[in-house]
Image (cartoon, coloured by chain):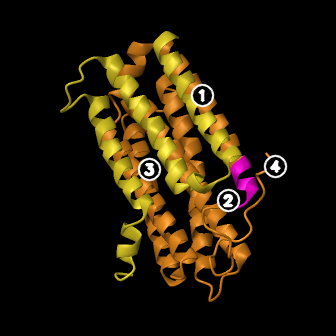
Chain colours: A orange, B yellow
Amino acid sequence: MSELATSPVTTPALDPRPAARPRIPGETGIWVFVLGDMVMFGAFFGIFVEARSHNVALFNASQQQLLVAFGAVNTCLLLTGSLFVVWGVHAIRHGAARFAPGLFGAAFVCATLFGIDKVIEYAEKLSVGITPATNPFFTYFFMFTGVHAMHLIIGMVVLARMRRIAGQPALDASNVRAIESGATYWHLVDLLWVVLFALLYLLN
Amino acid sequence: MITYLPVLLRQRSTAAWAVLMLATVISWALGTRHGLVVHDAKVAAIGVLTIAFAKVYLVGRHFMELREAPRSLVLWFNGLVASTFAIVVGLYLWA
């Protein structure tokens, strides 16, 4: 783990090292959080599949009440939001920082649309009497997507902060590192949803 | 922004995004078994899980920039993804 030193600076103008040299995007701490969160969600995934094995018919029937389009659209929104974030970080590193606030703003819009989609889906389920207490499938569905939604809300705050930092007239190394850390967190939100989509909406 | 767009479109991460979107459509078709000739539920399910974890790998490598990260971090990340995949598939098949 000795290699896990925080990357110093990421803007080429500020960092003369060759780009090929290994480096950690953002702070080391954000990666500790990312890996820890992946372990926690990994446990969620295992618990869900194990619970499913005890009542496959119930889980499959419950899954039929989900509209796959909700999950698929949300997957595309998060992937596209992640691309905007990647582009924004690229712009900052390559002398085009003026484009970064708009790109982070576009990612924020994707996140907002994800949230709206999720609210519509929850409302639709609740309107027909489906709640977390309906059966084990929906307990897991609301719990896992709810925890993920908390990640999304934090991610939206992070994106707003990234946009504000990127809008500053001049960025120093700590600004760039903060943006990289925020970007890494945002990609975690995307990454976790990719598996949740597969397990909750598609696995039958 | 229009002038800078071609630069962004040429990035490897943009190609990764296109692959991720295509993989989402394929897994959707596999999971709902529409338009594909996979009629065996277990094969389709393993396909869905494989695509999902392959997407996680791509997000890590291209969006989270692990392709440029120190080997130790890459090993931690990939090891976690691979072990979670193995546990989930194992539980699906044998639990």
Say what amino acid the circle numbered 3 marks: Val
Dot 4 falls on which chain?
A
User: Alpha carbon of mark 2 to alpha carbon of mark 4: how far?
Assistant: 12 Å
**What amino acid is at disc 4?**
Ser
| Tag 1 near tag 4, CB within 8 Å | no
Does the rendering let one see residue A130? no
Mark 1–mark 3 Cα distance, whole angstroms, equals: 33 Å
Residue at 58% across / 61% down in the picture? A183
Q: Is residue A31 magenta?
A: yes
- The disc at residue A155 is none
Q: In the drawing, does residue A37 fall left or right of residue B40?
A: right
- Alpha carbons under labels 2 and 1: distance apart: 25 Å
Residue under the image location 66 percent in, 82 percent down: A171
Q: Which residue is mark 4?
A: A2
Q: Which residue is mark 2?
A: A23
Secondary structure of residue under mark 2:
loop
